[in-house]
Image: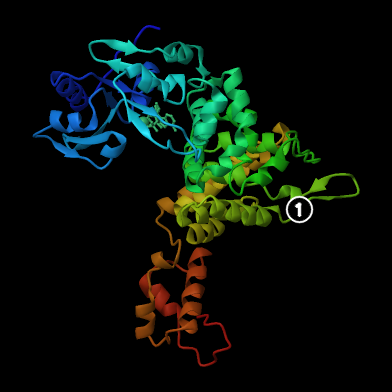
Amino acid sequence: MSVPSFSIPAPAAAILDRLEAAGHEAWAVGGCVRDSLLGLVPHDWDLCTSAAPEEMVRAFQGWTVIPTGLRHGTLTVRLEGENWEVTTYRADGSYTDHRRPDSVRFVTSLEEDLSRRDFTVNAIAWHPRRGLRDPMGGAADLEKGVLRCVGDPRRRFDEDALRILRGVRFAAWYSLAPAEETAAAIHGERELLHRVAPERCMAELRRLLCAPGEGLGPILREFWDILAELPGLDYLGALEGYDQQNPHHTLDLKEHTIAAVVSVPAREELRLAALLHDGGKPRCRTVDREGIAHFYGHPREGARLAENALRALRCENALRQRVVQLVELHDLWVPPTLPAARRWLGRLGEEGLRDLLALERGDTLGHAPGCQGERLELLDRWEALVDEAVSAGECLGLRDLKINGRDLMEMGVPAGPEMGRVLRYLLEEVQEGRLPNEHEALRAAWRPNPDPTRRCAP
Ligand code: ATP
Ligand code: MG
């Protein structure tokens, strides 16, 4: 493989030089080398060295260092306002808990350090003067587009089951095809995932789902069983091969879901919502006299299942709520009118409504080709209306109303339920275009109402 130019940041190069000036060996390793070989810009640079932890501390005397990870061989060096991690070459001991090595042993051989790493493409070292050190053949695998475990795949997954998910993520991100034995072990050892902490599963799932669509689609197809092994997601297993028996659908539920996932923008709330949007269908199926299946109520059931799954995965509340709301609303198809656009902007906010439209678009792109046109046109109209309402700075929610509770209190509206009723009424009048969103007009629209059972219409 011709070696593309590596652009190692100056502080990382200075750290390598400093260690070598002190008589040790030091290399860049892992993701930064893999990404550089692919012509991508690495998001961080992991460095490794033959220096033992206390030797590292000595080598960096006079520099700012953070020794938090030193027991595991990692020293953080603070340089030019950034943290750089340097790790002593390590060989991991046995893994009785299938997560962490029972012990780590510091070693002086780079080769030994590379052999504890998960995949060959992650086990390549690079040095500004010495070039690549690649005993596992990672660069060749990268060029062939192959993801291969370092060593025996079953043993490596048994040591640390998180590697199963990391493997699926790397394969999706870099369009790598898992080698035969690696793929077989991913499937065969998948039950080990039950031993991985749910939050770590969630962190990997989020990263996996944000992979570019070209790589993600085939990997979701091949490793759907892995998704269904994650906490709370076993119900996704039922989507595989599920015939929707409906003229709107030519794809089974799993394929429809994958089409929706890769069609929405690569943001985690959208990708998660697309993955979970139709999860409620199998439980909501009815068949009419013509033999056509319907799935009434599936968005609500899907939202319930999504809520449970995201709780089981220990997803943070804000993300969980956004995803569940998107799943619940994904099949609404409200007729596109300006008042409806204002109302929904008020309810979901601009970002929330745009996300919902993006999810509906992704969902539509997973429908039978002949059934997409009408829905796509409807979505185009919705998007144009949202643009119009937003660019006119129109009244979207109570916060944007040009009158607030304090103004109304001064005008004699009692605080409490009556206040809420008046504000909602005024908001609706503005959203429907019957009143301008202007302070004076809103003041004039409300008159004290002697009969509390009457609406406070002007
Ligand atoms: P990215 O940072 O893009 O996720 P990366 O490959 O740099 O990719 P890190 O989690 O930053 O991944 O880990 C750095 C390196 O440490 C990896 O490239 C790999 O060599 C090694 N590594 C990380 N996690 C494991 C693991 N669970 N088992 C074995 N080696 C691992
Ligand atoms: Mg990294």
Can residue 260 be seen from the camera position used here? no
Residue 301, located in which quarter of the rendered image? bottom right
Q: Residue at x 53, y 49 (%)?
A: 313
Using the image, determine if residue 25 lies above or below residue 56: above
* Rendering coords of residue 150 (x, y %): 48, 20
* Rendering coords of residue 447 (x, y %): 45, 85
Q: Is residue 289 left or right of residue 237?
A: right
Give ligand 1's quarter of the image: top left
Can residue 443 be seen from the camera position used here? yes
* Rendering coords of residue 361 (x, y %): 59, 41
Q: Is residue 145 left or right of residue 191?
A: left
Disc 1 residue type? Answer: Cys
Q: Residue at x 53, y 61 (%)?
A: 343
Q: Is residue 355 left or right of residue 247?
A: left
Most foreground residue, 434 or 190: 190
Q: Most extreme residue toward the left, as rendered?
A: 62
Q: Most extreme residue toward the bottom, as rendered?
A: 450
Q: Residue at x 13, y 19 (%)?
A: 21
Look at mark 1 in the image and give the residue it sits on: 284
How packed is label 1: few (under 14 Cα within 10 Å), some, or many (20 or more)? some
Query: Quadrant of the image for the N terminus?
Result: top left
